[in-house]
Amino acid sequence: MVLPSSDGGTTSVVPTPLKIIVAGGFGVGKTTLVGSVSEIPPLSTEELMTTASDGVDDLTGIEAKRTTTVALDFGRITISPHLVLYLFGTPGQERFWYMWDELARGAIGTVVLVDTRRLDSSFSAIDFFEHRQIPFIVAVNRFADADDYTEEEIRGALAISPNVPLMFCDARQRESSKLVLIRLVRHVMSKLPKPAMAASNA
């Protein structure tokens, strides 16, 4: 959005704000991704895990995890002078899924973060955004102790459409996380009608 100056000279650019959801199963790296890429100190509602979660939260493959997001993670990144992304990370545990509808309201798209050690933890997130017809991409977060799988193998296991972008990332690395967000924005833009795309680029 461009605002005219009072003297009719140089104009100032007000970036367009877009809401992005970072979703996925418990312990897949959502808080890490938001924190790695945010240009402001990320707001995180993480709490220490207690024995109350024993038998409720599945820690298979992430036994060393000691904290958990109980509401949301929030961050911001400026992609260009024209575009600012506001990031909302969802809680991963099933008992907090009732919050997802509220967090997803107004979002243009979603990054579904995946851990190949626990692919089944991602099914609910994929189903959620497919059912609500919210555009999403799948980002496979690479973990050192995870087996390597091809894109085709992961697509088959997750049963996602060929039209859904899938990419690999390291949620700890800012540039890697930024590329994921850029890929999502491009995916969303590709789904817009041409007049809407032209208006957004004006």
Image: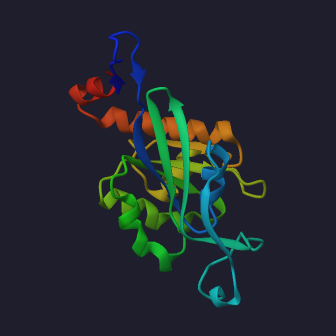
Q: For this rendering, which residue is in front, 93 or 19?
A: 19
Asked whether residue 115 is in view, the answer is no
Split into 4 quadrants, where in the image is the C terminus? top left
Q: For this rendering, which residue is in front, 121 or 182?
A: 182
- At horizontal 78% and vertical 54% (from top left) the residue drawn is 144
Residue 196 % position (x, y): 24, 30
- At horizontal 36% and vertical 66% (from top left) the residue drawn is 101
Q: Residue furthest front?
A: 7
Residue 129: quarter of image: bottom left
- At horizontal 62% and vertical 58% (from top left) the residue drawn is 31
Residue 139 % position (x, y): 55, 48
Q: Count the labels in the image.
A: 0
Q: Is residue 147 left or right of 177 when viewed as pictured? A: right
Q: Is residue 166 left or right of 53 when viewed as pictured? A: left
Vertical placement of residue 34 versus 186, above or below: below
Q: Residue furthest top?
A: 9
Q: For this rendering, which residue is in front, 198 or 58?
A: 198
Asked whether residue 177 is in view, the answer is yes
In this figure, which colouring scheme has been used for the structure? rainbow
Residue 66: quarter of image: bottom right
Split into 4 quadrants, where in the image is the N terminus? top left
Q: Is residue 113 left or right of 137 when viewed as pictured? A: right
- At horizontal 49% and vertical 36% (from top left) the residue drawn is 183
Residue 44 % position (x, y): 61, 62
Vertical placement of residue 48 versus 4, above or below: below
Residue 69: quarter of image: bottom right
